[in-house]
Amino acid sequence: MEIIRTVEAMQRRSEQLRASGSTLALVPTMGYFHEGHLELMRVGRKRCHTLMVSIFVNPTQFGPGEDFKSYPRDEKGDLAEADSVGVDIAFVPNTDEMYSAGSQTTVHVGKLTTHLCGRSRPGHFDGVTTVVSKLFHITKPHVAVFGQKDYQQLAVIRRMVEDMKMDIEIVGVPIVRETDGLAMSSRNSYLSAHEKRSALSLRKSIQLAATMAKGGEQSATRIKEAVEKLIRSHSDTVIDYVAICDPHTLDEIDTLVGESLIALAVKVGKTRLIDNGLFGEPPSHE
Amino acid sequence: MEIIRTVEAMQRRSEQLRASGSTLALVPTMGYFHEGHLELMRVGRKRCHTLMVSIFVNPTQFGPGEDFKSYPRDEKGDLAEADSVGVDIAFVPNTDEMYSAGSQTTVHVGKLTTHLCGRSRPGHFDGVTTVVSKLFHITKPHVAVFGQKDYQQLAVIRRMVEDMKMDIEIVGVPIVRETDGLAMSSRNSYLSAHEKRSALSLRKSIQLAATMAKGGEQSATRIKEAVEKLIRSHSDTVIDYVAICDPHTLDEIDTLVGESLIALAVKVGKTRLIDNGLFGEPPSHE
C-alpha cells in the first residue's frame, strides 16, 4: 500500500492513474478504524480498480468545546487495517497541507444543514463540505463511499455533489453495528462499560419507532414522546435531539406518510452519539 | 467548433480528451464578446491542446436591481467569433442545466470579497465563485484564463483555487482597451457617445495616480482626493468607490509602499464601469 502525504503528490498520482484508465474510489475518514470503516473500504474495493482511503481529523468540523484534541488517533494501526482490506493508497495529509496559510474559502450547503446535527453543531457541516470538496479535488475519485450512520452528512454531501456538478458517484453504506446493536463509532472508545449499556437506548429507540409505526401509530409526536421516555429511562443520558423527518428533505413531520427517518443524538456521559433508521412503509410505486 | 449544451455531455467530452492526453484550457465568459474576450481565448489557445470557452450569463452574480435581464447577449455572433480565434469547444448551458432544482450550495471566499466590489455588490462574489467552481467541475480544465479588468474577481478565484486545492492553473490577462483608453467591457454597449467621453475619466484616473506617485506623492488619501475630483469633473459620473490598495490583500492603504493597486467603480449614466491599474514601484528583491 502506498502512503501519500502531500496534496501535490496525491494529485499527480491520481492523474497518472486516471490517464492509464484506472477507476478510483475514495473512502474519506477521520481514522481510528472500526468495522464500519472497513465495510466502506470493502464496498469501495469492489467498485473501482484503485481504492484510496484518506485519514484526516479535520479541525474545522469540530466546534469550540468539542473533542478535536482528544479525538482518538492510531495512524499505524489504521494503515495496517487499510492494507489488510486491500486499500491501494492511503492519503494522510497534515493540517498545513489541507489548509493553506490565509485560507478563507468555505463550501456551504443551505437548508439541509439547518436541521438535526446542524442545529446543535453550528459550522459543523461547513467544515465537512469544505474538507470533502478539497479531498475530492486532491484525490479525483470516480466514486466516493460514505456511511449511513452520519445520515445527514451523506444527504448533505449528495446535495453538494449534485449542486456543484461534481462528476463523482456517491455511495452510501448501511450502518455496521456491534453484536449488541450499538452503531460502530470511533467515539465508542470513550464509553465506560456502564455507559455502553445506556448507549443501547439509541438502537432501542429506532426499534421502538418501527414497532409503533407497524402497530398503526401515525403520530410522529407520540412516537417521539415514547422514544424520549425510553432514552431518559437509561442512566447518564441527555437527549440532544430526537427527530422524525422526511428522509429526503430532513424536514420534521407531524404525521407519518410512507417511509420516515428517525434520527437521534444523545449524550451518554460526556460522549455524544448519533444513530438513525428508516421505518414505516416506503411509498408504493403503482 | 463543437457546441455542447449539457453538463453530462461536457463532462464526458472532457474526460475523453484528458484520457487521450490532451491538455484543456477554459475561458469562462458571460458572452457578448469584445477584443478583451478574444485576447483571453488567444492566450488559452497557446497554452493547451484543446481550447474551451463557456458562455453563461450567471443569474446568481447579479444583485436585485442589477442588469441581469438587460445584459447584452448574442450567442450566434459569439460562436462565430470563438470559432474564428480557434476555440475547439463552446460550452453553452442554460440556467436549469447549471442550477439543479432545490440547489442550495454556495462557495464563499471570506475577507478578500469584503473589499471594493464586494461592498457595493453583496453576494456578487458568492455567485462568481459558485458558478466558476461548477464550470471547473464540468469542463475539467488544466488551465483557466481570466481578465485583469475584474482584478478582484481574479484575486478571489486565485484564492479559491489555492484554498480548495483545485488542480488548475489560473492565468491572468492584461486589460484590453479601446484606442481611446476605455477598458473593453460588454457593458460599454450601454453607453451613449456622450457617456463614453465621461467614461474615459476611469482611465485618466489611473494615469493620474501613476503620475502623482512618480512625482513623489506618498499619500494614498491625497491621490484618492485628486482622482475623485477628476472623475467628478466629468458629467454624468457617480463614484461607487475609488480605492488604493495592497495588490495582494486588497486592504486599503494610507501610504504608498512599493507597488499599489488603484481600483475604481463609477456609474456613468446608468452604467456601472470598473477599471484598475498597478502603479508605484514594485518592491525590489535584493
Image (tube, coloured by chain):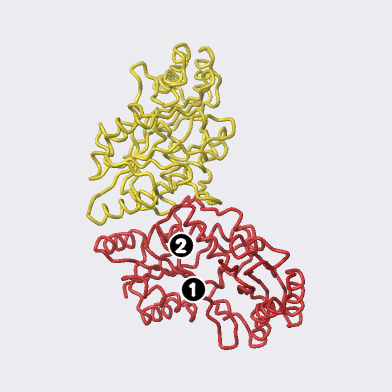
Chain colours: A red, B yellow
* Letter of the chain that mark 2 sits on in the rendering: A
> Can you tell which mark lies on residue A95?
2
Which chain is indicated by disc 1? A
Do the residues under discs 1 and 2 have CB atoms within 8 angstroms? no
Horizontal and vertical percent position of residue A5: 36, 66
Quadrant where the C terminus of chain A is found in the figure: bottom right
Whether residue A21 sits left or right of residue A133 in the image: it is left
Q: Is residue A101 above or below residue B156?
A: below
Q: Amino acid at mark 2?
A: Thr
User: Which residue occupies 71% across, 78% down?
Assistant: A212
Circle 2 SS class: helix
Q: Position of residue B10 (x, y in %)?
A: 35, 49
Q: Nearer the viewer, residue A139 or B31?
A: B31
Residue at 61% across, 67% down: A66
State the mark number for residue A145: none
Residue type at mark 1: give it: Val
Q: Residue furthest front?
A: A286
